Image (tube, rainbow, N blue to C red):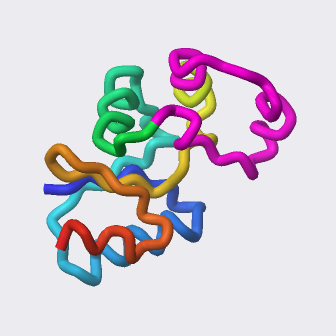
Amino acid sequence: MMTIYHNPRCKKSRLGLQYLQEHQADFTVVEYLKNPMDEATLKTILMKLNSRPQDMIRTQEAIYKSDFKGKDFTDEEWIRIMIENPKLIKRPIVVKDNKAIWGDPADNLAVFF
């Protein structure tokens, strides 16, 4: 079973969801803007992505440019920032077992099939 962390307003996220549907994957959808991640979930996903929090930041978002660009934060601070501002999280993220992948481009998800 896979989980896709999804924002239905995001074209890239919709393409990732479509990829899973086309490949008849067994998955659940978490709309993470409506149901924000907690710290433990975010840390687990980062571990499964094998990434640091800064790697997960959408630097093109207006809030990033106005509030965070050019500033130096610790990993813990970035995690708190993402929890408070989930729009900053790259999407979609698909998690299966001990692996997570960013579904941008959607073809990245082929590793699960």
Quadrant, the C terminus: bottom left
| Residue at x 54%, y 42% (from the top left corner) | 55
| Residue at x 28%, y 83% (from the top left corner) | 22
Q: How many marks?
A: 0
Locate residue 63, reporting x and y percent: 78, 37
Question: Would residue 47 appear left or right of 8 to someone viewing this image?
Answer: left
Quadrant, the N terminus: bottom left
The residue nearer to you, when weighing 29 against 49, is 49
Height in image: 10 above or below 80? below
Where on the picture, by quarter, is residue 40?
A: top left
Locate residue 88, reporting x and y percent: 62, 41
| Residue at x 80%, y 34% (from the top left corner) | 69
The residue nearer to you, when weighing 53 against 22, is 53
The residue nearer to you, when weighing 85 against 106, is 106
Query: Which span of residues is magenta-colored?
Result: 52-79
Locate residue 39, reporting x and y percent: 40, 21
35 magenta-colored: no
Height in image: 76 above or below 33? above
